[in-house]
Each structure stands twice: as C-alpha cells, then as structure tokens.
Image (spheres, helix red, strand yellow):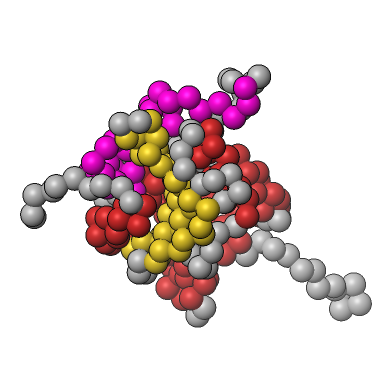
Amino acid sequence: MVAYDRSVLRNDTLKNRVLAAALREVERLSRLIEIEKAQVATARSLSMMFSDCHDVEVLFARRDAFVRTATALGDEARKGRDRDLLALASIVLAHESFEHGASGGRTAPRAWFLNLENLFQVSVRRVLDRLYSGRVTTAVASALPSAIFANETQQFRANPDLVLVGQQGAAAIGDVKYKIWTGSASASDVYQLLVHAAAFKTGTAFLVFPHREFVARDLGISATGCRTWLFAVDVLKLPEHLGLALQRLGLSSKALPVE
C-alpha cells in the first residue's frame, strides 16, 4: 500500500470551487447586462483553469451555498486580496444582486455595475452644457458636417465626445479620456482629436482627464492649425474646473445664478 501510494496535486478546493462557480455566472450575466465580449472570453478562459471543480454541484446547483462558503472563506482569509476576491465572487453568485429579491445577511439586495468611463463622459458634457453660453452636444446630435473624406462621407466620420456649438458652427471639440493623468496624452489620442477638429472645421480642441486637481496644458498650434489643450479636472469640482477650462479656451460662460 505504501509503495503504490502517490501524492496528486488537485485544484478541487473550496476556494477554487467558489471561483469556478462565479466565473460561470459571468456568461449568464452577459445576457442580462452589457459586458464586453473580451471580458466574457476572459472569464471562459479562466474557467478552464478550474476544470477539476466542474462537477454537478458547481455546474447546476443553487448558488446560495457558494455565497455562504465565499463569506466564510473571506472571513478566514489572511490576505486582503483573497478577501476582496471572495467578496466579489459572493456578490456575483448572489442572484439578489442582479434581480429583485429580499435583502438579508451579508448579501446586497441589488447592485449595479457602472461603466465609470461613460459616467465621467456624460457628467463632463452635462456640466459644460450648463456652463457654456452656446450648446454642448454629441457629434450626431449637433447635425454638423463631420465627414473625414470627401469621397467617403458615410463610412469615415469624426465622432468626438463633445461638440461645443457656437453661432458659426463648432466653436470647439473635445474628447473625454477616463485614464490616469500623467501630465500628457498619448499620441494616438492627440492625432484622433486633430482629425476630429479638422472634420468639424474648428480651430480649438481639447482633452479632459480625471485628476485630483485642476491642470491646464496648452500644446499650442498644431500643424493643422488647431489650438490644442489638455485639461485635468477633479470629479468633485467639475463646475469650477470646467469653468476654468472654458476660460482657457476663450469661450464665454453663461451667467449662472449663485447657488
């Protein structure tokens, strides 16, 4: 018996079973809420790492037991990253987090996964529209010509995040980048911005980044003749910081009532 006894490494542990079950929920959730295809593909790939755990319970059983297991394992975990991972798994596995249901215990009655990039973009556009004396809108809603090529007016069109419309067309265009502010912008973001500006026939363009304080960087006049700015703004002080950005751009602000 001793001679034929051999140790075998297995991945079928309680923690891995919880993670395997949570990864399988990503596919289901993608049918309820919008999840990028690349994220779903990644979840499928990671799920294959836990093939040892794919028994009847993990594949088809109710998720309640896994939520309790994840909570218990999280309480016992010594490393912070393990606690965070198990806490996320328990939320994904708790169906009440995505469907109406009674709250109780350690589960969230309802949760929403927000796309912070879209939220930041919409917030910047709405605040600018409240501050700017003209109108702030999207490329499509502006109804202004935005073709990049004269012979291909439909396929290749400029689509900036922000179009500041004045009396004579586009006064400025801008893009909102939900990226870490490093003091500059990537070359590709600047090139794209300049093409947008040329398509809308405006001489002013800017990029907006989230940051802890207001920063304005004037890149000067480009080879295309466009004055280009980089702005970093604090999301908690958007009206103040975007108002300063409008001043740098040389655009007038509305006379807003004092709040």
Q: Position of residue 130 (x, y in %)?
A: 22, 44
Vertical arrangement, residue 3 with respect to residue 123, above or below: below
Quarter of the image that includes the N terminus: bottom right
Number of numbered callouts drawn: 0
Quarter of the image that includes the C terminus: bottom left
Closer-to-camera residue (144/86): 144
Q: Residue furthest right?
A: 3
Closer-to-camera residue (200/118): 200
Q: Residue at x 40, y 23 (%)?
A: 143
Let me know if residue 178 is in the magenta part: no
Q: Position of residue 156 (x, y in %)?
A: 61, 27
Closer-to-camera residue (167/104): 167
Vertical arrangement, residue 249 with respect to residue 6, above or below: above
Closer-to-camera residue (156/101): 156
Quadrant location of residue 209?
Answer: bottom left
Horizontal side of residue 30 vs 100, given as left or right: right
Q: Position of residue 215 (x, y in %)?
A: 39, 66
Let me know if residue 128 is in the magenta part: yes
Vertical arrangement, residue 122 with respect to residue 50, above or below: above
Horizontal side of residue 226 vs 166, given as left or right: right
* Res. 137 visible in picture: no
* Res. 228 visible in picture: yes
Q: Residue at x 81, y 73 (%)?
A: 7
Horizontal side of residue 53 vs 66, given as left or right: right
Q: Position of residue 135 (x, y in %)?
A: 29, 35
Magenta part of the chain: 124-150
Q: Residue at x 50, y 68 (%)?
A: 183
Vertical arrangement, residue 169 with respect to residue 249, above or below: above
Horizontal side of residue 243 vs 113, given as left or right: left
Q: Residue at x 45, y 63 (%)?
A: 217
